Image: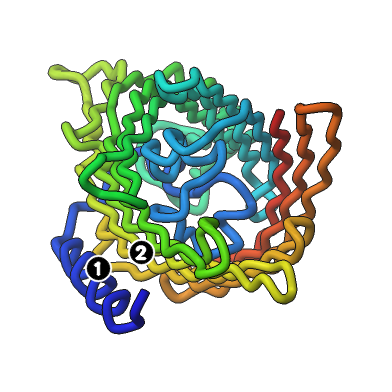
Amino acid sequence: MRVTYIICLLFLFISISAYGAEKYAGEFLSLGVGARALGMGGSFVAVSDDATSAYWNPAGLGGLDRTELAFMHTGLYGLDKYDFVNVVHPFSKAGTLGISWIRLGIDDIPMTQLAKPGEMSASNRPFISGYMQDTENAFLLSYGKNFEPSFLKGNNIQLGGTFKFIYNSITGANRNAVGFGGDLGLIWRASSLSKEDSHPSADLSIGLMAQDFFKTRLFWNTTSSPSHTDIVQPNIKTGVAYSHELKSISSQIVFSVDANTRHGLEMNYGLEYVLADLLAIRTGIQGHDFTAGAGINIGFKSGDSLLSFIVDYAFLSHELGNSHRISVMTKF
């Protein structure tokens, strides 16, 4: 596949997402899941080839052929606890179904009030009257299916969608919110066959993700009339990924680029090098922040069955402080 062809497609699809979107509520859903994708700068819209596709681009679920379980737990900046758990299962030609849970919790948030009603002064200082906890949850139901059009030999079209139920609560303040939303995704994968055999030696993928395409609304149980509603604005993400197999050293290299318009145009870049399907090294740029990571894949084969156990690590730099993510995935 010619380099000029790849470059033209890259600029074409990245330019589509130059239209901005408003900042949105439910910010915890932008933190990302899976140390592999995060180590690649979050540039995963066109890569999406594992269980975390339910979050990054549900269309990618259509390409999975094994049941996968994924888990991630981390503390953010010494204050937050962030968790992700999901399971995906393929139903032969009927497609792949996934269920995910994302949670962000912040404990011991102080609540203050003045000692006396009125204005704050040297003799009327605020004091801590109690503590509250902010918990934000999202439950995702995802589906993806793979299509192989006869008129596009060597090409796959993957389509998918995610339904989101969001529940937020602030204990101590007796406030909670519920909301519903949805994502739609598409991935086109094209393969270039090697001269020696029919095994793909290179792949080009183009991904499109429409997040919160109908606007996601969070309805709070406030005492005001009408009650307060947060709106998550729609967001379009596009991406291009190119992978090339290096048979001489039993390895593969993947390069990906994403454009995200959630907070204005943000470009994400990712690079992954996989050796013998065992060890992986990754790096990336997420906006203006550097990311890096590594992974190990241990496989056990019994007859026709293959059990894979994968551990991934990611380092993320940020102006609020650096963070580390570790995720575990199993495939069977």
Crowding near pointer 1: few (<14 within 10 Å), some, many (20+)? Answer: many
| Viewer-side residue, 128 vs 234 | 234
| Viewer-side residue, 231 vs 93 | 93
Give the left or right position of residue 136, taking residue 83 as reference: left
* Residue under pointer 2: 240
What's the distance in space between the residues labelled 1 and 2, CA to CA?
A: 8 Å
Q: Is residue 317 visible?
A: no
Q: How far across and down, in percent of the image, does residue 187 sit?
A: 33, 48
At x 33%, y 33%, the residue is 160
* Residue under pointer 1: 14
* Vertical comparison of 12 with 145: above or below: below
Give the structural element (helix, strand or loop) at label 1: helix
* Vertical comparison of 223 with 70: above or below: above
Are circles 1 and 2 on residues that touch, CB within 8 Å?
Answer: yes
Q: How far across and down, in percent of the image, does residue 39 sit?
A: 61, 62
Crowding near pointer 2: few (<14 within 10 Å), some, many (20+)? Answer: many
Q: How far across and down, in percent of the image, does residue 184 sit?
A: 27, 36
| Viewer-side residue, 231 vs 52 | 52
Q: Earlier in the sequence, mark 1 or mark 2?
A: 1
Callout in the foreground (1, 2): 2
Give, as a three-letter code, the residue at label 1: Ile
Visual colour scheme: rainbow
Give the structural element (helix, strand or loop) at label 2: strand
| Viewer-side residue, 330 vs 115 | 330
Give, as a three-letter code, the residue at label 2: Val
**Total residue callouts:** 2
At x 34%, y 24%, the residue is 163
